[in-house]
Image (spheres, rainbow, N blue to C red):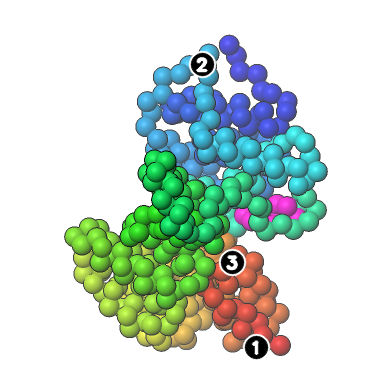
Amino acid sequence: MKYKKPEDDFTIITAKSRLLALEMKHGFIDCVHLFLAMLKEECLAKKYLQGIDIEVLDKQIRDLYPATGTQTRKDDVALTVRAERTVKHAYIIAKLNGRQKINSIHLLLAILCFKDNTIIAPVERAGILIEDITEDYFKKKIKKFPSPFYAIRTKTYNKAEILLLKITGKKKKKIPELYENAATLYLYYQFEDVIKVCEAGLSLSPGDLDFKDLIAYGKYQTGDYQLALSLIAELIESKPGQDNDNYKVTQAYIYDVIGNHDQSAVILDKLLTEHPDDQELLNHKGFNLSRQGKYTESIPFFEKAITADPTDAYALSNFGFSKFKLGEVNEAMSLIDKSIALHKGNAYAYKNKGVILKEQGDREEALKHFNLALKFGYTEKYGDEVLQLIKDLH
């Protein structure tokens, strides 16, 4: 049967995502198929998705799942649990927009509400924000929508409750239920709720490393760095002989954020001994040195990182800032501008360029770039430095 394009905006996307899933032989429709359909079809959401490389994303999605599906166009293709949940969330968002029916914009906003790296990475590089979409389409700026999930337990279990769960045989079932709830909340950036649910889980399963892992990263995301470091150290100690590199990288990053650069350097040097060509570690080591004012020493690490990945916007921005500190202003601006062109949501690059403009006496342009840094989440990601820089301008 020849495919006939539907007229309804939302149906256009679901129909196209079905065709994509069939073509890729994935056997199901996930959020990535819905998102790719928005890029490939003429729909209301497409105007907000400029700057995303469709071919690159298409290949990533094809490689994401095995091509083992056997359905034909005559067969049903089911939504994944996540995709189904996202469609339901789109209806909640539509109601906030005063609509009963959903369109591709509501669906896009629902997809952008949770962390899926396949989608979020190109979205961030393109500088796409929920607040810009809502300001244009809703005629009011909304930075974040309520999660479609709620914390199923926000306080620890007391002895009587634990005993009752044991007697009724519900304790073993309750522990994974709490973990799944916390893990889902984490994807929706509900970090305070993640911590509460996991603490409830620990009251049922003391010492549970999975709950401690989520609490550690929840504390890290909410800026409770000391407790995050304590928990990460405990997790590393609890898993001797295992690959704990991700924990160690996070440790090093936190140490740099709180100004303990020497401790970060110890961790990074050890990791680089084991992985001397790791692009992210090379950039991080350069950043660590630059934070200590060792700009000349940072240059080789940034150069190696950029050689490994010439499109790494963060390494380019960091490299540019070190060049600026060494007096090479024109090259610095060129590197940072390239970083911003590659990643329009790179808050650190806007901050770095703002600092250079401030030093050059261009207060208006400096303020513009500091505000862009704030818009793209500098404070939430890195702290209050930009707020202080703006204060210093006045």
Closer to us: mark 1 or mark 2? 2
- As rendered, which of 298 and 257 lies closer to the eye? 257
Q: Disc 3 to disc 1, how far (Cα)?
A: 20 Å
| Mark before the other along the chain sequence, 3 or 1 | 3
For label 1, the crowd category at 10 Å Cα-Cα, with few meaning under 14, some 14 to 19 and many 20 or more, is few
Residue 234 horizontal/vertical position (percent):
31, 68
Question: Residue 377 bears which disc, if any?
Answer: 3
Q: Quadrant of residue 15?
A: top right
The quadrant of the picture occupied by the N terminus is top right
Three-letter code for the amino acid on which mark 3 is drawn: Gly
Residue 45 horizontal/vertical position (percent):
68, 42
Q: Which type of secondary structure does the marked residue at label 2 adopt?
A: loop
- Magenta range: 128-135
Question: Residue 392 bears which disc, if any?
Answer: 1
Q: Is residue 175 above or below residue 239?
A: above
| Mark before the other along the chain sequence, 3 or 2 | 2
- The structure residue drawn at horizontal position 67% and vertical position 28%, both measured from the top left corner, is 11
Q: Is residue 139 above or below residue 387?
A: above
Q: Quadrant of residue 16?
A: top right
Three-letter code for the amino acid on which mark 1 is drawn: Asp
- The structure residue drawn at horizontal position 53% and vertical position 19%, both measured from the top left corner, is 76
Q: Disc 3 to disc 2, how far (Cα)?
A: 44 Å
